[in-house]
Amino acid sequence: MDQRALIDSPEAAVNVAIVLCDGFSLLDVSLVAEVFRQKNELSDAAHTLDKRDSVTMLSSRGGYVTDSESVRIRTDAIDEHLSEHFDGVFVFGGKPKNVASIDQADLRALRKVLLNASLVRWSDHGWGMIAASGYEPKSEGWRSGSQQSEKKHSYVQNDRSVAGRGTNGLLAAALSFVPADLCIEIAHRISRHVVAPSLDFSCFDEDALSEVSVADRIHASVQWLRKNCRRSISVAQAAEAAGMSERTFLRHFKHVTGKTPSEFLLDARFEMICRLLRETTLPVDKIARRCGMGGGEHVSRVFRRRLSQTPTEYRATHRATDSSA
C-alpha cells in the first residue's frame, strides 16, 4: 500500500503520557500505545518524521512498574514532567492496595500533570488514582470507573461513525488523535493482530473496514502501474495486480484515485518523459519509446495539449532555468 497516499493531514504531532501503577492491564496499555505506534509507522512511510507522536510512560516514582502478570515496564517519574504539556494522558491503575500505597506528594504531582493535559482518560482501576489525586474530570460522562464513549470523541470515515465502548473506550480516545483518513486503517490493523475477549470491534462499520482492503489493493495496483508504465499494459493485467475482476477494478480505481487507469498511466508516463527531458540529452523519439509512448509525434501532441509547448521547447526552458539558478 502506498502510505504516502494516506498521509495528507496538516495536524501536528501529539505528545501523550501513559501513567501506570503496579497491577495494570498490559493489554489495555498495549492497545493505546499501538495506536500511536501505527500512526508513527505510517508517518515514517510518508517521510513525515516531524509528525511523529511521542508516548511517555510515567509512574509515581519512576523505574520499573509490574503489570498483573509480572511483566515489567520502564517508566519516568511523574514529577519529572510537571511543566510538560500532554495532549492526552491515559491512566492505568492496579489493585486498590497498590493505589493506596502511592505517596501523597506523588498524587499531587499526578494532579498537576492531569490539569495541564488537553485530554484525560483512564481504565477501570485507573479511576482510583484519578480520585486519590483530587483531580476533577472536565467531562461528567467519564466520572465512573467504567468507560463510556463520548459523542465528541466519535470518528467519521465516509460518513460512517466509529466509536468506542467498554474496553474500546480507551482505544477510541487514542484514535481521537488520528486523522480521519487513517482512523479506519489503524483500527483495521489492530483488529487483525490483537485477539482479546474484551476487545469488541463490532463498533467499527464492516463496510468501512472492507473499503480499507479495497483501497489496499488499488494502491498496490498503483505501485504496479508506476513500476511497469514503460511497457504496454492492459486493463486485465492491472486488474490482476489488484486481485480484482476488470469491471470491479475499473470502478474502484476511479473511486480511490479520481482517475481511470488509462489517465493514471498517461500521467505516470508524462512525468517520466518530463524528467528525462530535463536530466538527459536523449532524443525525443528515444524517450518516447523508453516511456511506452510509441513515438515522438504522440509525445508532442500530449505536450501541446497539456503545456502548450513542444517537448523540445520544454527541455530548452528547463535547461535555461537550471543554468540560471
Image (cartoon, grey):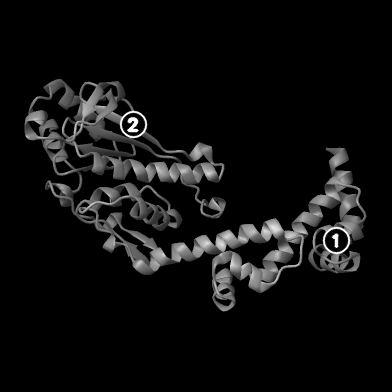
Residue 90 lies left or right of residue 97; in this view the side is: right
In front: 37, or 142?
Answer: 37
- Residue at image mark 1: 288
Residue extending furthest bottom?
247
Residue 57 seen in the figure: yes
Q: For numbered disc 2, what is the local secondary structure?
A: strand
- Residue at image mark 2: 56
In front: 235, or 50?
Answer: 235
Residue 266 lies left or right of residue 219; in this view the side is: right
Q: Residue at x 50, y 44 (%)?
A: 43
Question: Which quarter of the image is occupied by the C terminus?
Answer: top right
Question: Which quarter of the image is occupied by the N terminus?
Answer: bottom right
Q: Residue at x 56, y 75 (%)?
A: 245
Give the foreground label among 1 and 2. 1
In the displayed structure, 303 sits above or below 280; it is: below
In the displayed structure, 15 sits above or below 244; it is: above
Amino acid, disc 2: Thr
Residue 160 lies left or right of residue 25; in this view the side is: right
Q: Residue at x 29, y 54 (%)?
A: 153
Image-quadrant location for residue 78 = top left
Amino acid, disc 1: Ala
- Lower position in the chain sequence, tag 1 or tag 2: 2
Q: Please tell me how crowded label 1 is: few (under 14), some (14-19), or many (20+) other residues with Cα within 10 Å.
A: many
| Residue 126 image point, x, y percent | 16, 38
| Residue 37 image point, x, y percent | 40, 41
Residue 285 lies left or right of residue 74; in this view the side is: right
In front: 274, or 150?
Answer: 274
Estimate the spatial distance between the alpha carbons at disc 1 and disc 2, rounded to whole Å.
Answer: 54 Å
Q: Residue at x 56, y 51 (%)?
A: 4
| Residue 6 image point, x, y percent | 51, 54
Image-quadrant location for residue 111 = top left
| Residue 132 image point, x, y percent | 10, 32
